[in-house]
Image: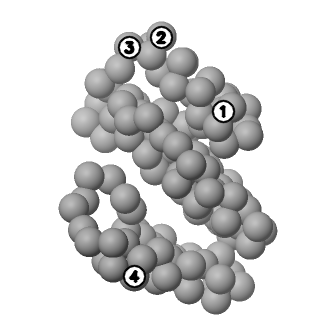
Amino acid sequence: FTLADLPGYGYARRSAEEGESFDRMIADYASTRNSLRAIFFLMDMRREQGSVERESIEYFERLNVEVIVVGTKSDKLSKNEIANVRRAWGDLFHRSPELILATSSTKKDGRDDLLRAIGDRL
């Protein structure tokens, strides 16, 4: 199996041309790999997500690629804030909040859930 880290949006400063180039590269990658089964879509739980993220997820789903939504930096939020983000993302991305993984690389929160989700798809 291959685990590929594709460029994201994040806080990267780039020109509109660079953004379009990244978008084309990701679209080409996803649309030409028949073996692509799942995308783990990582997003900072402290940031409000919107139409760009929703449209990206919908694009992959139209390709019949499963999208697993993963919230990062959960250690920066309270349990109540994490629950609120999961509910909001559930509404935005049309999925049950329980299916949204909350992770922290520094505290290793959600690590086992994420590894299980990867293993389940192998």
Q: Look at the picture and state if 18 lies above or below 77.
A: below
Q: Which residue is mark 2?
A: 80
Q: Secondary structure at mark 1?
A: helix
Residue 46 visible to an observer of this rendering: yes
Q: Residue at x 38, y 35 (%)?
A: 47
Q: Residue at x 45, y 16 (%)?
A: 81
Q: Nearer the viewer, residue 83 or 35?
A: 83
Q: Residue at x 74, y 72 (%)?
A: 63
Numbered tag placed on residue 78 in the rendering:
3
Amino acid type assigned to the residue bearing label 4 in the image: Ser
Q: Choose mark 4 or mark 2, whichever is in front.
A: 4
Amino acid type assigned to the residue bearing label 1 in the image: Gly
- Gap in angstroms between the C-alphas marked 4 and 1: 29 Å
- Gap in angstroms between the C-alphas marked 4 and 3: 37 Å
Q: Choose mark 3 or mark 1, whichever is in front.
A: 1
Instruction: Compare marks 2 and 1 and give the one earlier in the sequence.
Output: 2
Q: Which residue is mark 1?
A: 90
